[in-house]
Amino acid sequence: MSFMGETTTVPGTNRPRLLQAMVDAFRQEEVRRKLLFTIGMLIIFRFVAHVPVPNVDRNALEQAFDGNAVLDFLSIFSGGALQNLSVAALGVYPYITASIIMQIVTPISGRLRALQEEGEQGRRRIQVYTHWLAVPLAFVQGYGQIIFINNQGGGAVIRDFGFQNDFIGTIATLFTLCAGTMFLVWLGELITEHGIGNGVSLIIFGGIVAVLPGLVPNISTSSIIAVAAILLFAVALIFVIVFFQEAQRRVPVQYARSSFRGGRMYRQQGQSFIPLRVNMAGMIPLIFAFSIVILPAVVAGYFSGAGGWVETVADFFVNQFQGGRGGGGTGIYWLVLFVLVVGFAFFYTIVQYNQQNIAKNLQRQGAFIPGIRPGPPTEAYLLRVVTRITWGGALFLGAVAVAPFFIGLTTDVQALTISSAGFLIVVAVVLDTMKQLEAQLLMRNYEGFIR
């Protein structure tokens, strides 16, 4: 792609700029080491994703997943590890849940807020608390998922699972799943420290990309028109995701700058800006919304054979909310999903904005927004700007969430797309990783990927 009249090839070579940047990345020893280390850790993750927990009946497991949209959705985010019921079946999502909880609790707790203000040492302490919180969450999530899978497989996926039936075996299975989750978190942190990109995000990315080959048979049985429509939707969705991920509102800021010349101090006015992202919440609202919207179908599944009005209500929720992926689910499912995504986008954006204390930091540094008084007026102005631009980010996330529904309506091909949340994760992680690789190359005087 060419911007502002620039050529897409490197002068003196016939190589495209992107290809040349890749060659430069592998030519530089330190960058090459980081890239190979990252790839190696992802390969280890994929090996672990195929190691099953003990006492799994493969036939019953296949029966449990046969046509179950909820399990299909959960399996996509585990990179197929849940479908194998491997030691990595939970992925890193207990850790992500713990991170979200800590982000929400930190502004409320005086002790955690004080730790956050201590700098790097305080943040490391909060990270330790996040790790400890992820352990019980992994136990709870692992127990709930196996119970649900067992119910879908007639109770034969892992026989006698449950504290009343086999206490020792149940504890051993849950310890295995928890150990798998924390091992993946450790791999992610190794990638962050010694590789390229955010490690935990790359673990999720690797899991989602790993299921893509399994979608090819679904596409190959479709008509050429349907495949073309899907590709157009995918390209348009990638364009929209990149546009909103990079979109920001720049709020101008002025500050006083001191300099010494000839033994005298001079005060000058400098100018900068605050970049407020349109999608400040990232992918978190999608994860929250999908987790909640599949809950009615999961709970109703326990009462589907209860009889009477209870079974009628349970069947209604199962039929309406068992969407999960692709074009499945009814209009109610997708409408509720859209509303939840928009609501969580506002909620999480406000949580993140309050943690940044932008107005306080500006006042402390002697900076101000032109035409706005420092202190509470600045805070009120920034909150008003954040609220306005969040409407764009929230509606964008809502549109991404329900995109598979419209793809299913237009192409009449069901259950072939990865989750829209997964699509957003893939694009966002690729952008973030390219930026970090770009920074590594520019530090060593190479031209990077992005111009």
Image: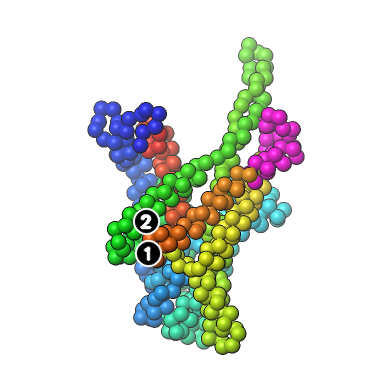
Label 1 secondary element: loop
Q: Quadrant of residue 69?
A: bottom left
Asked whether residue 181 is in view, the answer is yes
Residue 210: tell me if it is visible.
no
Disc ID at residue 348 = none
Magenta span contains residue 378: yes
Position of residue 254 measured from the top left corner of the image (x, y, whole percent): 65, 28
Q: Is residue 199 above or below residue 137?
A: above
Q: Which residue is mark 1?
A: 413
Quadrant housing the N terminus: top left
The reply, left or right, for residue 188 in relation to residue 339 is left
358, above or below 94, in the image: above
Tell whether label 2 touches label 1 (CB within 8 Å).
yes
Position of 152 compared to 370: left or right?
left
**Tag 2: amino acid:** Ile
Q: Measured along the vertical axis of the image, is residue 169 above or below residue 331?
A: below
**Neighbours of disc 2 within 10 Å: few (<14), some (14-19), many (20+):** many
Q: How is the image coloured?
A: rainbow
Given the image, on which type of amino acid does mark 1 rest? Val
Instruction: Please tell me how crowded label 1 is: few (under 14), some (14-19), or many (20+) other residues with Cα within 10 Å.
Output: many
Distance between the Cα atoms at labels 1 and 2? 9 Å
Residue 391 pos. (x, y %): 60, 48
Taking 229 as reference, is 257 left or right?
Answer: right
**Residue 20 falls in image quadrant:** top left
Q: Residue at x 33, y 38 (%)?
A: 18
Task: Classify the position of the C terminus by image quarter.
Answer: top left
The residue sitting at the top extreme is: 262
Which secondary structure, mark 2? helix
- Residue at 50% from the left image edge and 45% from the top image edge: 245
Q: Which residue is mark 2?
A: 230
User: Which residues fall within the magenta stretch?
Assistant: 359-387
